[in-house]
């Protein structure tokens, strides 16, 4: 089985505290470990993450230990950088054996082609963020930030991370094919590569499954702040599921 999830935002309290949600995620990882061959966590694992040369943010021990257990069992684990944890470098690769992706990838599972990426900065509009993303991904900017003492740098960046997340009345409803920017992006990418079967994104914080055409499907994985949604591919078809949340809802489905 191939599993996909995104937007854990560990470090941020929501329906549950961050510590309680971490344990919930650990229970989910423990459950899927019985049949998982690949686990893709598609961005914003943490609400903020920055790796200094000799220091990483404290906490998340139980989650990290469980991920290490998965890789020790021979399960492939992939971390995709999101807009809240884009400053993830090689710590997880060296310590946990996970594969880190700074951009989207194309991957084949069961004869199906998957386009997988967090989704931040994709599609039309949002030009301000696209500029900010280039600055934050700049090696010189990362080097300069690394000179801030962790006692200053981590609280400062965490504060900015929380301020960047402003509530929107549109956040938890499907906006329509003409306004869902990641759906539009998937349509445009499909024109370049019509062989893609599934587009898998996070970032949107809304669990969405929407057919693009007779062959291809756009999927947004939603989030774990409130809905605990994830996707599972059994080699033939992909389904959206909810962990410890029986009232979860998929939007955009026909």
Image: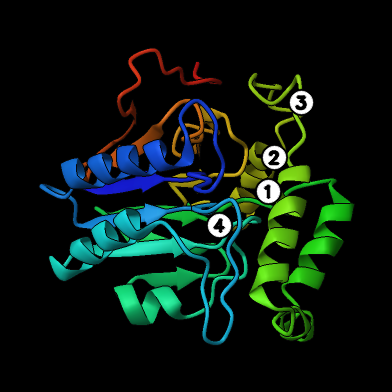
Q: How is the image coloured?
A: rainbow
Q: Are marks 4 and 2 in contact (CB under 8 Å)?
A: no
Residue 213 spot, x, y in % from top left: 52, 33
Query: Is 111 positioned to the left or the right of 179 in the image?
Result: left
Q: Which residue is mark 1?
A: 188
Question: How far apart are the alpha carbons under marks 1 and 4?
Answer: 9 Å
Kindly state the secondary structure of the residue where label 2 is placed. helix
In the rendered view, tell whether residue 134 sits above or below residue 141.
Answer: above
Residue placed farthest to the right in the image?
A: 128
Q: Residue at x 81, y 59 (%)?
A: 130
Question: How far apart are the alpha carbons under marks 2 and 3?
Answer: 20 Å
In the rendered view, tell whether residue 4 sits above or below residue 145.
Answer: above
Residue 61 spot, x, y in % from top left: 34, 60
Q: Residue at x 76, y 26 (%)?
A: 168
Q: Residue at x 72, y 39 (%)?
A: 181
Residue 166 or residue 121, whichever sits in front: 166
Estimate how packed mark 4 is, as few (under 14), some (14 to 19) or many (20 or more) residues with alpha carbons within 10 Å.
few
Of labels 2 and 3, the one closer to you: 3
Of labels 4 and 3, the one closer to you: 3
Query: Is 176 positioned to the left or the right of 210 in the image?
Result: right
Of labels 1 and 3, the one closer to you: 3
In the rendered view, tell whether residue 155 sits above or below residue 219.
Answer: below
Question: How far apart are the alpha carbons under marks 4 and 3?
Answer: 33 Å
Q: Which residue is mark 3?
A: 168
Q: Which residue is mark 2?
A: 184
Kindly state the secondary structure of the residue where label 3 is placed. loop
């Amino acid at each position: 089985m191939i599993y996909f999830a995104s937007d854990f935002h560990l470090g941020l309290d929501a329906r549950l505290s961050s510590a309680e949600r971490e344990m919930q995620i650990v229970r989910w990882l423990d459950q899927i470990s019985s049949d998982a061959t690949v686990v893709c966590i598609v961005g914003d694992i943490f609400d903020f993450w920055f790796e200094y040369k000799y220091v990483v943010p404290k906490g998340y021990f139980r989650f990290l230990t469980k991920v290490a257990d998965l890789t020790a069992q021979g399960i492939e684990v992939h971390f995709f950088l999101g807009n809240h944890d884009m400053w993830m470098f090689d710590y997880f690769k060296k310590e946990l054996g996970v594969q880190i992706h700074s951009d989207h990838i194309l991957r084949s599972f069961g004869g199906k082609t998957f386009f997988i990426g967090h989704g931040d900065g994709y599609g039309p509009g949002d030009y301000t963020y696209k500029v900010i993303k280039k600055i934050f991904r700049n090696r010189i900017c990362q080097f300069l930030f690394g000179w801030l003492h962790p006692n200053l740098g981590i609280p400062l960046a965490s504060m900015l991370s929380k301020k960047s997340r402003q509530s929107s009345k549109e956040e938890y409803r499907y906006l329509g094919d003409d306004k869902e920017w990641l759906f539009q992006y998937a349509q445009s990418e499909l024109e370049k590569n019509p062989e893609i079967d599934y587009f898998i994104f996070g970032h949107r914080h809304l669990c969405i499954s929407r057919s693009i055409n007779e062959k291809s499907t756009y999927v947004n994985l939603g989030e774990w702040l409130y809905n605990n949604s994830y996707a599972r591919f059994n080699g033939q078809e992909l389904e959206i599921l909810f962990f410890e949340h029986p009232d979860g809802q998929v939007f955009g489905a026909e």
